[in-house]
Amino acid sequence: MRTEYNRIAGQSLERLAALSDGIFAVAMTLLVLDLHIPVSEIVHSQQPLWVSGALQSEQPLWDVLVRLAPSLVTYLMSFLTLGIFWLGQQTQLNQFARSNRNLAWIHLAFLLLVSLMPFSTALLAEYITYRLALVIYWLNLLFMGIALFASLRYAWQAGLMKEETTAEILAANQRRIVYYQILYAFGAALCIVNTYISIIFLVLLQLNSVIAPRIGRLNRF
C-alpha cells in the first residue's frame, strides 16, 4: 500500500516543542535589545556627571531613564506576554498524544506571530501615544490567541489528544483563551480614552495571570 508523505510529516511533538522553546527564547532576548541607553547624551552634556572625580549632577541620567520608561514598560509587558503564551502552548503540547502535518503548521503559524512580538513591542514603545501602534500590538496578541484556540479545536477533532484529556479539560483551556482575549480586547479599546490607560490595564492583566493561583480567580477560567 502506497504511503502519502502528508500522513507521516510533522509527527514529532518533541521537535515541535524544541523549536518553540528556541523561538520564544530568541523573541524574549530580542525584546531587551530595544532598550538603548543614549550614553552620548550624558557624555556630551553641558553639565558633566564627573568633574575631578566628584559627582556634580545626576540630572542627565535621570532624564535618560525617564525617556526610557516607555521601552521599559513595554518590555515588561511583552516579556510577561510571551511567558504566558509559552506556558499556554506547553500546556497544550503536554495534552497531545501525537502530532500531524496540519497541527505542526498551526503551531508554526503561532510561532510566526511570536517572532513578531519584538517588532510590535518596539513599535508601541516608539509611538506609545498612538492608538494605531497599540492596536497593532493587540492584533499580535489576538492572532496568537486564535492560533492556540485553533490548535486545541483541531487536535480534539483529529483525535490527537491523550486519552486522559477530557472534554472538561478541553473546555477549561478554551475558556481561558477566550476570556483573556476578551480582556485584551477591552484593554485595547481603552486606548480610545488614553493609550497609557490601555497599557496599564494590560500590564496588570498579565501580572494577574502570573500570580492568579495565589490571589486571583482568572486561573479558574
Image (cartoon, rainbow, N blue to C red):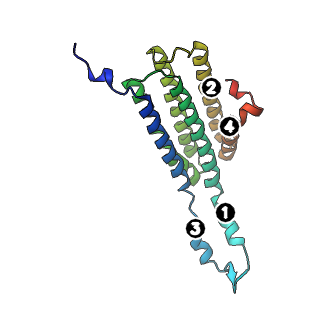
What's the residue type where badge 2 is placed?
A: Arg
Q: Quadrant of the N terminus?
A: top left
Classed neighbour count for the residue bearing mark 2: other residues with Cα under 10 Å, few (<14), some (14–19), many (≥20): some
Residue at numbered disc 4: 210
Residue 65 is tagged as: 1
**N-terminal of the two: label 2 or label 4?**
2
38 versus 191 height, above or below: below
Label 4 amino acid? Val
Q: Nearer the viewer, residue 4 or 204?
A: 4
What amino acid is at disc 1?
A: Leu
Q: CA distance from mark 1 to mark 4?
A: 27 Å
Q: Which mark is residue 159?
A: none
What residue is shown with label 2? 176
Q: Is residue 127 above or below residue 96?
A: below
Find disc 3 in the rendering and name its residue.
Answer: 38
Q: Is residue 39 above or below residue 56?
A: above
